[in-house]
Image: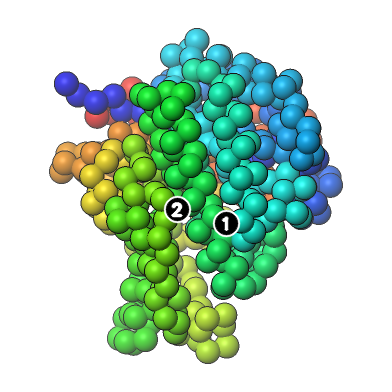
């Protein structure tokens, strides 16, 4: 019997609706001018109708922890009921909900008192997740964390995301606690829904040496590929996380996550070229280069469809279903957006034809939204948003995606 293929779109709560109680609301001053972003919290019924227009059969979205628990001792049942209503609308429309529990943002009280490098963070997040799991009905696909390595890099190595720390040892501790949470939450979900499917959404990129003739650049590319793409997969297979930072000893960390995945979410956007530069952090300089002729996105990222095949082939070693939980492009050019979509879905078709157990494709994003550290100018949406009037308009790419869904029979 052929497995169902999920055609979907992906969003995150904070990027659509904001939250006055979230760490990011205080972190990025641009949100002072658009605190409600697209006002999706109030316009959600209108936005969910767009899913039916597209013809998708799945929708990936997140719940905003800071709205549900704005203070450590306050739990807002009205907000929980709001997200339950979204789930009910989806299931009534035969659209499968994919619910993300953690998509970068935290309540201010959490990030100030119990950031991820503190052991209390595990109990605080597990308590939150457990209450949601017990309360929410109608969800069979759960994503515990979105891009834990991006959270690690931005929050603990670059310091460009909350909590704004630059410390390798604290970064390692934070990652250990986040993945420990995954293991605990995985078990809780299966207690309440033994048939549920639980995964993570892992950002994977293609890596290449800046100068192919340079052995140091090639070595850095190899290290980056293992650390960023592969180390998490190996940890789920073995229960041991091996971390190798440039010019440091390998660290081995035991984690309670072995085989605690029912599917694996791949977020894929770009290829990155690396070279050794002693003046840069950890001696690594990053660059995007348009070597394939597809151009760069409005965020300066290289468009590299072949990289999607490479990361999917490696992820398939997990031996569980794969789902592309994010893939998209920031551009105002509809033709470029359509070309991006077609080239990547061609790769999806090729991988399925060659035996990779790929069960879904989620385009990022449904509507234009707030993009971390980029404000409102990175136009990923299939539907354009006028941030002054909050009007949504379909792009030609939305029409094309709807056509693709009907014409591709995976």
Q: Position of residue 357 (x, y in %)?
A: 23, 39
Q: What SS does tag 1 mark?
A: helix
Residue displayed at 72% across by 39% down: 66
Instruction: Name the residue carrying label 2.
Output: 203
Q: Position of residue 407 (x, y in %)?
A: 29, 25
Tell me which label, 2 or 1, sits earlier in the chain: 1
Task: Indicate the quadrant where residue 240 lies.
Answer: bottom left
Whether residue 124 sits left or right of residue 277 in the image: it is right
Q: Considering the image in quadrants, where does the N terminus appear?
A: top left
Task: Indicate the quadrant where residue 159 lies.
Answer: bottom right
**340 or 83: nearer the eye?**
83
Task: Indicate the quadrant where residue 161 lies.
Answer: bottom right
Q: Which mark is residue 6?
A: none
Residue displayed at 50% across by 58% down: 176
Label 1 Cα crowd, 10 Å radius (few <14 / some 14-19 / many 20+): many
Whether residue 18 sits left or right of residue 121 in the image: it is right
Q: Which mark is residue 151?
A: 1
Q: Is residue 131 above or below residue 303?
A: above
Residue displayed at 55% across by 14% down: 88
Label 2 Cα crowd, 10 Å radius (few <14 / some 14-19 / many 20+): many
């Amino acid at each position: 019997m052929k497995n169902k293929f999920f055609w979907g779109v992906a969003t995150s709560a904070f990027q659509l609706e904001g939250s006055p109680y979230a760490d990011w609301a205080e972190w990025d001053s641009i949100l002072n001018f658009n605190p409600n972003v697209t006002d999706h919290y109030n316009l959600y019924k209108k936005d969910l109708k767009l899913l039916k227009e597209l013809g998708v059969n799945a929708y990936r979205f997140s719940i905003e922890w800071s709205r549900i628990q704005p203070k450590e001792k306050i739990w807002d049942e009205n907000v929980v009921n709001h997200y339950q209503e979204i789930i009910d609308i989806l299931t009534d429309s035969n659209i499968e909900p994919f619910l993300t529990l953690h998509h970068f943002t935290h309540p201010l009280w959490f990030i100030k008192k119990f950031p991820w490098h503190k052991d209390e963070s595990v109990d605080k997040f597990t308590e939150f997740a457990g209450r949601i799991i017990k309360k929410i009905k109608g969800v069979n696909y759960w994503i515990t964390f979105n891009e834990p390595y991006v959270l690690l890099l931005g929050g603990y190595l670059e310091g460009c995301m909350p909590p704004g720390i630059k410390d390798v040892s604290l970064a390692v501790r934070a990652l250990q606690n986040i993945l420990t949470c995954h293991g605990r939450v995985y078990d809780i979900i299966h207690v309440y829904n033994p048939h549920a499917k639980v995964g993570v959404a892992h950002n994977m990129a293609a890596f290449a040496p800046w100068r192919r003739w340079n052995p140091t650049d090639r070595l850095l590319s190899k290290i980056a590929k293992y650390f960023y793409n592969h180390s998490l997969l190996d940890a789920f297979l073995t229960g041991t996380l091996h971390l190798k930072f440039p010019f440091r000893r390998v660290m081995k960390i035991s984690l309670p996550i072995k085989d605690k995945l029912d599917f694996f979410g791949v977020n894929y956007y770009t290829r990155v070229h690396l070279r050794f530069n002693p003046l840069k952090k950890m001696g690594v300089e990053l660059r995007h280069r348009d070597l394939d002729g597809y151009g760069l996105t409005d965020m300066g990222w290289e468009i590299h469809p072949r990289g999607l095949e490479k990361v999917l082939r490696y992820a398939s070693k997990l031996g569980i279903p794969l789902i592309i939980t994010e893939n998209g492009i920031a551009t105002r050019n509809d033709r470029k957006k359509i070309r991006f979509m077609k080239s990547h879905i061609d790769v999806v078709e090729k991988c399925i034809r060659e035996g990779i157990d790929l069960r879904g494709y989620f385009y990022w994003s449904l509507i234009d939204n707030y993009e971390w550290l980029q404000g409102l100018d990175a136009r990923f949406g299939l539907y354009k948003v006028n941030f002054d009037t909050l009007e949504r308009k379909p792009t030609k790419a939305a029409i094309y995606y709807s056509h693709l869904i009907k014409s591709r029979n995976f």
